[in-house]
Image (spheres, helix red, strand yellow):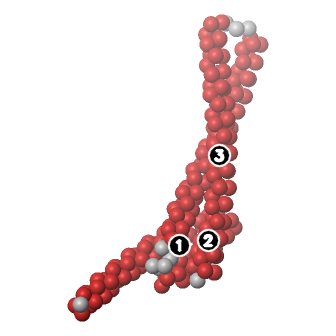
Amino acid sequence: MSCTIDKALADAKTLVERLRDHNDAAESLIEQTTALNKRVEAMKQYQEEIQELNEVTRHPPWSTLVMGIQHIRELQQETKELRTSLEEHQAALELIMSKYRQQFFFFFFLRRSLQHSKELQAHVDQITEVAAVMKKAIEIDQQQGCKEQELIFQLEQENKGLREILQITRESFLSLRKDDAGVGGSHL
């Protein structure tokens, strides 16, 4: 039994380390996204200033106008590329945060289950199976990112099943306790 709990704790520790890695990656993406937002804002401001200057001068020299148009086109292309990059970073950040939350909630459930292990000895094999499924899910996630949503759904269903089994077990345990108390009380 202690071997199984130790293994589950080791798996939980691995999950925590991975969650920290995901958190670090998310913070890095947030910093990059912030930097990109600042650049986009600076380009917008520059474009507004160019427009104001054009309105003030109304009739700039032809060469200045051509150079300004070329520069504006370059800025528009760079702005488009930055927006695309920003959208990709935001999508990646959302995916990482989603995975982080899912793994955190699963870790929380596992930790809580381990704290109540004395009451749940009959279900240790099922918890070990869930831990094995989670470990396999992590390996599959590293190899095949596209299957992660399907696996998370399966884990949620198993989690729901375990909670239902846990509720039934608790109800049975309380019922047995009441029956034992009732039998013990009638002999007194």
Q: Do residues under tags 2 and 1 come within 8 Å of each other at their CB atoms?
A: yes
Q: Nearer the viewer, mark 3 or mark 2?
A: 2
Q: CA distance from mark 2 to mark 1?
A: 8 Å
Amino acid beneath label 1: Leu
Is disc 1 placed on a helix, strand or loop?
helix
Amino acid beneath label 3: Glu
x and y percentages locating residue 135 in the rendered image = 63, 72
Q: Which residue is mark 2?
A: 9
* Picture disc at residue 27: 3
Q: Is residue 166 above or below residue 180?
A: above
Mark 3 or mark 2: whose residue is earlier in sequence = 2
Q: CA distance from mark 3 to mark 2?
A: 27 Å
Q: Nearer the viewer, mark 3 or mark 1?
A: 1
x and y percentages locating residue 156 in the rendered image = 49, 69
* Residue nearest the observer in this picture, 138 or 43: 138
Is disc 2 placed on a helix, strand or loop?
helix
Is disc 3 placed on a helix, strand or loop?
helix
Q: Quadrant of the C terminus?
A: bottom left
* Residue nearest the observer in this picture, 45 or 105: 105
Mark 2 or mark 1: whose residue is earlier in sequence = 2
Q: CA distance from mark 3 to mark 1?
A: 31 Å
Q: Residue at x 57, y 62 (%)?
A: 103
Q: Is residue 25 left or right of residue 172?
A: right
Q: Is residue 81 above or below residue 186?
A: above
* Residue nearest the observer in this picture, 46 or 158: 158
* Residue nearest the observer in this picture, 61 or 182: 182
Q: Which residue is mark 1?
A: 114
